[in-house]
Image (spheres, rainbow, N blue to C red):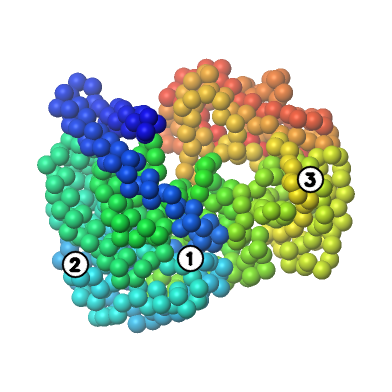
Amino acid sequence: MKKIAVFVFCCIGLLTASAQVKGDEDQEMFNKEGAARDAAAIANAVNGWWTASMKDRDQRLQWWRDAKFGMFVHWGIYSLPGGEWKGMEVKGYAEHLMRKEKITRKEYLELAHQFNPVQFNASEWISAAKNAGMRYFIITAKHHDGFAMYPSTVSDFNITAQTPFKRDPTAELREACKKQGIKFGFYYSHAFDWEDPNAPGNDWEYKNPGGDLQLYGGTNWYNLHPELLKKVQRYIDEKAIPQILELIQKYHPDILWFDTPHKIPLSENIRILEAIRKADPDVVVNGRLARSAGNNFGDYQNTADRPAEFYPVTGDWEAIPTTNESYGYSKFDHSHKPVGHFIRLLASAAAKGGNLLMNVGPMGNGEMAPEDEVILKGIGNWMQKNGESIYGTKATPLPLQSWGVSTARPGKLYLHVFNYPTDGKLHVGGVLSACKSAYLLTDRSKSLKISRSDKKDVVIELPGTAPDTINTVVVLELAIPEKFDAVRYLAPNIPLTRMLAFDATLNGKGFGFGDGKTNRYYVSGWKSATQTIDWNFRNETAAAYRVVLKRIRDTNTGGTCSILLDGKLLATEKIEPTIKGEQIEDRELGTIILKPGVHQLLMQPVAISGQELMRPLELQLIKK
């Protein structure tokens, strides 16, 4: 109980401190009242129903942990225009059409009256997911536009009341999931609703808070204007909670997925979660419903959208890439990533103990977009042969390797070889256990020769050419108990080793991470000369490498930084602010000669003249 009291006290302090504005006594008072309200909700949860609900967390989450890979579907009436409005392309997320074009409820209903996805076939959708290797499926029951894609009795702003389709696609999808053995769930926008006059978000028609105009104090509106909170609570009581309970009682989902919790107070998010837990103690709830600086009240954490790399996360987590750059279907967005991007992303997520919930945006006629079908089939071809290396695996105990990533289960390592060695020798560093056997996952009949280069490292003889140019999986069976070295290993025959900032050791307080999107996998918050960043690694043969720093600088960066190898100065980098915007740069730091052993590359500020020094993305070691 003492720990709980300290936790609640800390939450009050964090919530209050983050919102205060010096010199405004009324605002300070309202912020304190808001912090006290949220702290009371936290205390009620932690001292009672939430703590009780977490006793069964491992049991309800087990299927999700084993599944590793799911399909996320953003599909609504916004899918019909597909990113076009009144003959013009609408940039950004296609599912945000209503907000971006400031469409009124009445005009949006006119669009709904044209929505008739006669090509929709639930069995085909679920078959596409299953054939791609996905083991759970989540559909948007209601997105931010407030339109229910099922026959809701709570609001007539729904698919059967307002469209000529007159069918319940969610019921059909639920039934198809049951038949094909796929777990089923809903996305529900609880904190954003652009059609409801009481909900946050619509500031063009209702002048409500939570929208782009930042009305009533912006993100802090619910503390500065508590009178508006009663209005939002009416929306939660009369629409959000009733519809969520309707989904639970009618469709019995295995998982519920929420987003944008910052649009309403933490106390309201917790109240919604409590209603869910009372209705169904066994449903999995993602991490974007209720979270504070001190705790995440969901069953697992969600990382950033559209990741290319993953920042460090402790515990259970899930990332949500999408096939292009929009979640809802956009006829203009042709930025679809190659199949290999998702295969490697899936392996990388599993290697760090996470799940991948990959989004597709079906078209307004009810069919999957052809580009998405190609991607799904390509992933499926790989998963049919290599699924064992993903499903039910754990985060790897093996240190980081130059050739790719690894996943694990007791007595087995699955070595996902992205960078295939041209000499056919796979150097695996840090294996202290006795090795029993090695083979290609796609060809178990042929044993691969294993030898030791020293006590810590093994060499596996691979075929001369890569069986799979995207990701060849090698199985290494080990004697139990397993033992590993912890230091990153630099393979002697891989020409490029990327040392990501996400994988570095951060020394000092105040660092943060980028969201992991393309060119956003940086470390931020480098504001003090006492903060340093380093990478420790080990090599077994002498070699020369070029060292390249990939970094971001902008108008607020500036200073000088020393880069040291094993305590000796390698280079000094001067970081100038840009005149405008961000610049992503590759900086040659020089050549190093590495003798066999353990080494450290250290980045240490000499002086910081900007708001932060810079934002490093990675160090590259390029073999000469």
**Mark 2 or 3, closer to the camera:** 3
> Label 2, label 3: how many angstroms apart (C-alpha)?
61 Å
Q: Which residue is mark 2?
A: 155
Residue at image x 82%, y 32%?
596
Tag 1 or tag 3, which sits nearer the N-term?
1
Q: Which mark is residue 509?
A: none
> Given the image, on which type of amino acid does mark 1 rest?
Tyr
Which type of secondary structure does the marked residue at label 3 adopt?
loop
Residue at image x 84%, y 62%?
447
Residue at image x 56%, y 20%?
605
- Number of marks in picture: 3
> Label 3, label 1: how many angstroms apart (C-alpha)?
35 Å
Residue placed most toward the observer, 539 or 274: 274
Please indicate, yes or no, whether residue 216 appears anywhere in the rendered image. Answer: yes
Residue placed most toward the observer, 481 or 99: 481
Q: Residue furthest front?
A: 1
Tag 3 or tag 2, which sits nearer the N-term?
2
Q: Which residue is mark 3?
A: 433
Answer left or right for 288 relative to 444.
Answer: left
Residue at image x 67%, y 54%?
409
- Residue 583 % position (x, y): 50, 37
